[in-house]
Image: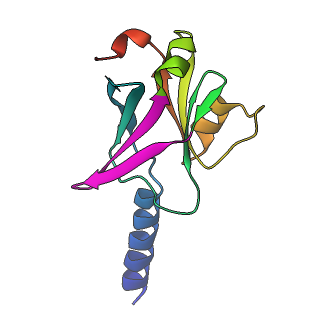
Amino acid sequence: MKKIILLTLSLIITFYLIAQEKAQTKISSVIQKGETIRYSLSSSQPFIVGNNRYILHIGDRGFSQYEQSKSKGTGLITFLIPVTDFNDLPDGKSVFLTYGSVSEDADLESLANKSTRCWFIGKFEKDILTK
């Protein structure tokens, strides 16, 4: 009986740890369509659909208008950034994705290391844009 209890407990812990694993998120495309930049991110897991919103942080700017979809257990989220705003962004700034808002003075790098709701995407580069 003890073996069954231990096995059950270990399975519960294993499933909990797997469920808490942070999704791998990366840039999948950056495409200009008219006056809008479609900045797409893909994830190894579907993006959460809930009451909070995702926010794409590039340097000190935040963008929250997006489209979201999922396919075969992976996620895709496309942020819609006006071309003028995109052109004003400086290269080399850190790019983060958060689920929910964060304070303006939040340390996103530290948050990305500790939270399952903040991801470091990389450094911003305009030359990734495909027209």
20 or 14, nearer to the observer: 20
Please say if 22 is above or below 9. Answer: above
72 or 53, nearer to the observer: 53
Magenta-drawn stretch, dominant element (helix, strand or loop): strand
The magenta region covers 64-81
Is residue 32 within the magenta segment?
no
**Side of 32 relative to 21 (left or right):** left
Residue at 32% across, 45% down: 44
Residue at 36% across, 54% down: 46
Q: Quadrant of the C terminus?
A: top left
Is residue 76 within the magenta segment?
yes
- Residue 61, image x and y in percent? 63, 26
Q: Quadrant of the N terminus?
A: bottom left
Please say if 37 is above or below 67. Answer: above
Please say if 118 is above or below 72. Answer: above
Please say if 124 is above or below 26. Answer: above
- Residue 85, image x and y in percent? 55, 21
Residue 31's quadrant in the figure? top left
Outermost residue to the front: 34
- Residue 107, image x and y in percent? 71, 31
**Side of 31 relative to 17 (left or right):** left
Residue 57's quadrant in the figure? top right
